[in-house]
Image (cartoon, grey):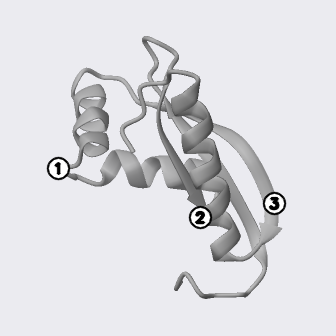
Amino acid sequence: MPLSSTEPQTYRIYALIDPATRFPHYVGQTADYLGRRLRQHVNKHQTTKKGLWVRALVDAGEWPEIVLLEEFVGDRRRAYERESHWIARLKEEGCPLLN
């Protein structure tokens, strides 16, 4: 869906949590269910910092935990704004985010 979409729907801002340290390592947004979004992260083989972190967890027999930070009805632009808000907030709190 393009960034300019004004179609209102339910969005979820989430964090991927390291199971060992309990720190968030990634913040994302989705209009999908969180369980489905987590499986997408685990099954996608990316060479990004986040992708390599997820792959290392999976290779060690672990999965990141997905935690809901915020849920709202709005458009895609607002979802990106709220995602940016949470990234800034968690970085300010010292979380080792990869995004």
Q: Nearer the viewer, mark 3 or mark 2?
A: 2
Asked if 26 appears above or below 4 in the picture, the reply is above
Q: Is residue 34 shown above or below 17?
A: below
Q: Which residue carries the number 1 mark?
A: 47
Q: Quadrant of residue 90?
A: top right
Q: CA distance from mark 1 to mark 2?
A: 23 Å
Disc 1 + disc 2, Cβ < 8 Å = no
Q: Residues within 10 Å of mark 2 (few under 14, many from 20)?
A: some
Q: Kindly identify the amino acid type of the residue bearing the numbered disc 3.
A: Phe
Can you tell which quarter of the image residue 57 is in?
top left
Quadrant housing the C terminus: top left
Residue denoted by label 3: 72
Q: Earlier in the sequence, mark 3 or mark 2?
A: 3
> How far is disc 1 from disc 3 in space, using C-alphas?
31 Å
Res 32 visible: no
6 vs 85, nearest the viewer: 85
SS under mark 1: loop
As measured in the structure, the alpha-carbon distance from the residue carrying label 3 to the one carrying label 2 is 12 Å
In the rendered structure, the answer to whether residue 73 lies left or right of residue 19 reads right
Residue shown at 78% from the left, 53% from the top: 71
Q: Nearer the viewer, mark 1 or mark 2?
A: 2
The mark that comes first in sequence, 1 or 3, is: 1
* Kind of residue at disc 1: Thr
